[in-house]
Amino acid sequence: MHIYMLSLFPKMFEGPFNESIVKRAVDRGLVQIDIYNIRDYAQDKHKVVDDYPYGGGAGMVMKPEPLFDAVEAVKKNIASQVNKEGSLSGGEAQDSTSVILLTPQGRLFQQKMAGELAQKPNLILVCGHYEGVDERVREHLVTDEISIGDYVLTGGELAAMVVVDAVVRLLPGALGSSASAEDGSHVMGLLQYPQYTRPPSFRGWEVPATLLSGNHDAIARWRRKQSILRTLKRRPDLLMQAPLTDEERQFVEEEKGAV
Ligand code: 6GU
């Protein structure tokens, strides 16, 4: 997979992409991440990338020309790469490439979307800034708009890093052999059960006896029950959607009554 990041603050990506799982995935050749500075595509000698909003009001708006030029430069690179590899025609690859704007007005980013993005050969992530971007960017350049939650960040960079992290860990081979991308929270629609490691007694707090029992059926039942209880308490919205058996639904109704 090839990910292209377009940003006014390219240095922000240096730390997160040079550590841990993302770095390992890059080192293993599972993903290539290229950072483009939008300011390099400004058209005047002062490298202006923003301007006052028509109609007045507070804040600045990102100008369309540098964003269009930067995305088109990336698409040319994708096309020349594809021509070398010879699978699709360059034009086809360009047309099918997702161009995603990170903005608080976007669709809410969720695990399902991470899974869909992880299937794509190329992703272009455009980090919005200032009070917004010229509407023509939304209408004629990007294919998707993503938000990572209901709060306002100073720019799309941190959100783009969240998206990249969530996508890269799903690439086959990105996690070590002992870890599984399928195992964590949310994939099953339930929150993860409580985890413990040694020692069995710490400051007088004991690991639940079931986990020490060696009875794998009992352990699986205990974990499933804990996941359901934790999801009911913290994220009842998730529980509505979760794939529960009739017996588990019954259990949820009893617990609800008990609360
Ligand atoms: Cl994608 N951008 C900004 N600026 N703020 C956000 C966001 C994105 N997602 C949540 N808040």
Image (cartoon, grey):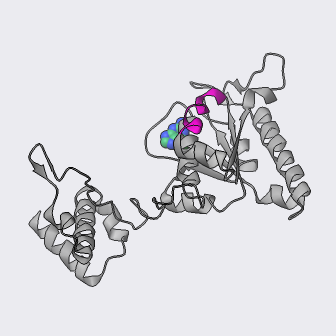
As drawn, is 233 to the left or to the right of 170?
left
Residue 204, compared with residue 154, is above or below; it is below
Q: Which of 79/201 is in front?
A: 201
Q: Which of 113/194 is in front?
A: 194
Furthest residue toward bottom: 246
Residue at horizontal 31 percent and vertical 67 percent from the top: 239
Residue at horizontal 87 percent and vertical 58 percent from the top: 85
Residue at horizontal 73 percent and vertical 30 percent from the top: 37
Residue 43 appears in the picture as rendered: yes
Return the x and y of residue 183 as percentages of the image width and height: 42, 63
Residue at horizontal 60 percent and vertical 58 percent from the top: 171
Q: Which of 159/199 is in front?
A: 199
Quadrant containing the C terminus in the rendered view:
bottom left
Q: Which residues are magenta?
A: 10-19
Return the x and y of residue 62 as percentages of the image width and height: 68, 31
Q: Which of 7/202 is in front?
A: 202
Q: Quick check: is 153 in the magenta stretch? A: no
Q: Quick check: is 17 in the magenta stretch? A: yes
Quadrant containing the N terminus in the rendered view:
bottom right
As drawn, is 161 to the left or to the right of 89?
left
Q: Main secondary structure of the magenta part?
A: helix
Q: How many marks?
A: 0
Residue 137, compared with residue 191, is above or below; it is above
Residue 55 appears in the picture as rendered: no
Residue 223, compared with residue 91, is above or below; it is below
Furthest residue toward top: 46
Return the x and y of residue 231 as percentages of the image width and height: 28, 61
